[in-house]
Image (cartoon, rainbow, N blue to C red):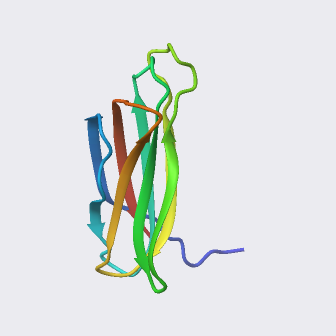
């Protein structure tokens, strides 16, 4: 068996949002440079160990069927009292139209929290 077409994704965006204490409103990551597939990866971490909080991340994109959004839980405590509460990664794989915005937002649930958010976008 041979695979005549192997696609290696290219990293087209790499951003960090450190020491966040509030929700991040809808924020552009980048406009899609071509119609095609994109993997957007988020990683979150917090050192808040005395509160039970969570961070949700929502991705926004546009394809041939319109504007879409998808929300996933990113950071939630596992063992309160540890130096690092919980770290989590979330991946989205989307088809986006050229020139349309890939964007995200965060929301805080269950109280206040200080968190770091890292994201990468790969284009296929």
In front of the other: 96 or 53: 53
From this view, report whether residue 88 is shown above or below residue 104: above
Left or right: residue 103 compared with residue 109: left
**Residue ID at (52%, 51%):** 72
Left or right: residue 30 compared with residue 6: left
Where's residue 15, x and y in %?
Answer: 28, 49
Number of numbered discs on residues: 0
| Quarter of the rendering occupied by the N terminus | bottom right
Quarter of the image where one finds residue 30: bottom left
**Residue ID at (50%, 29%):** 86
Quarter of the image where one finds residue 28: bottom left
Outermost residue, right direction? 1
Where's residue 74, x and y in %?
Answer: 49, 43
Where's residue 47, x and y in %?
Answer: 39, 23
Where's residue 81, x and y in %?
Answer: 50, 13
In front of the other: 97 or 124: 97
Outermost residue, top direction? 81
| Quarter of the rendering occupied by the C terminus | bottom left
Left or right: residue 48 compared with residue 90: left
**Residue ID at (37%, 30%):** 113
In front of the other: 35 or 64: 64
Outermost residue, front direction? 111
């Amino acid at each position: 068996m041979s695979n005549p077409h192997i696609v290696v994704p290219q990293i087209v965006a790499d951003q960090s949002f450190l020491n966040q204490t509030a929700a991040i409103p809808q924020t552009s990551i980048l406009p899609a440079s071509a119609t095609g597939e994109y993997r957007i990866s988020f990683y979150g971490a917090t050192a808040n160990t005395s509160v039970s909080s969570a961070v949700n991340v929502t991705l926004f994109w546009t394809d041939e069927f319109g504007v879409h959004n998808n929300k996933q839980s990113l950071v939630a405590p596992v063992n309160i009292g540890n130096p690092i509460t919980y770290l989590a990664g979330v991946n989205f794989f989307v088809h986006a139209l050229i020139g349309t915005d890939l964007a995200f937002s965060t929301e805080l649930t269950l109280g206040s929290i200080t968190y770091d958010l890292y994201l990468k976008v790969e284009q296929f």
